[in-house]
Amino acid sequence: MIIPITRRISEAPKKIYDRATSATRGELEVHLAAENDRLERERAASKIEGIKKEVRDRYLAFADDIAGIRDATEAAAAIVPEAHEVNESLGVIATEVAKAIDGLSVELDRRIEAARAGKAAPELPQSLTRSLEFHPAK
């Protein structure tokens, strides 16, 4: 069956519109997917920053507690000379923990940068995010 020319001409603008709409929709979907990916990476980076802050806060509390214990053991050393050994051990422990926390902090910074740059999977293991929920900082 032959379609009359007037009908084909009247359908032409609709086909052009449909193609343009389809192309625009495709572009919008690409932009939306890119924006969703960016937001997911930023969410992951923010979670890592939260974990880093939690580690830092707990370390600072630990360092304060160790300093207090060292002061107390120093006072105890006047009565029990062996307390000097405890005090020295606490100093070694504090130094080792500080080194470990510094290394962890550097690695977390790398993960934050990678997440923001899109070089890392944005999904964090649930065990990392849930552990902070059960043990909030004081």
Image (cartoon, rainbow, N blue to C red):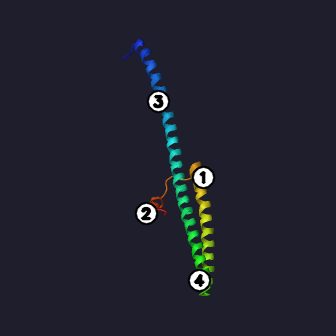
Near-viewer residue (114 or 48)? 48
Q: Closer to the N terminus: mark 1 or mark 2?
A: 1
Q: Is residue 108 above or below residue 81?
A: above
Where is mark 3, residue-wise? Answer: 22
Mark 4 burial class by Cα count in 10 Å: few <14, some 14-19, many 20+: some
Residue at 55% in and 62% down: 57
Residue type marked 2 = Phe
Residue type marked 3 = Ser
Q: Closer to the N terminus: mark 4 or mark 3?
A: 3
Contact flag, marks 1 and 2 (Cβ < 8 Å): no
SS at mark 3 in the image = helix
The circle on residue 103 is none
Q: CA distance from mark 3 to mark 2?
A: 49 Å
Where is mark 1, residue-wise? Answer: 113
Q: Closer to the N terminus: mark 4 or mark 2?
A: 4
The circle on residue 134 is 2
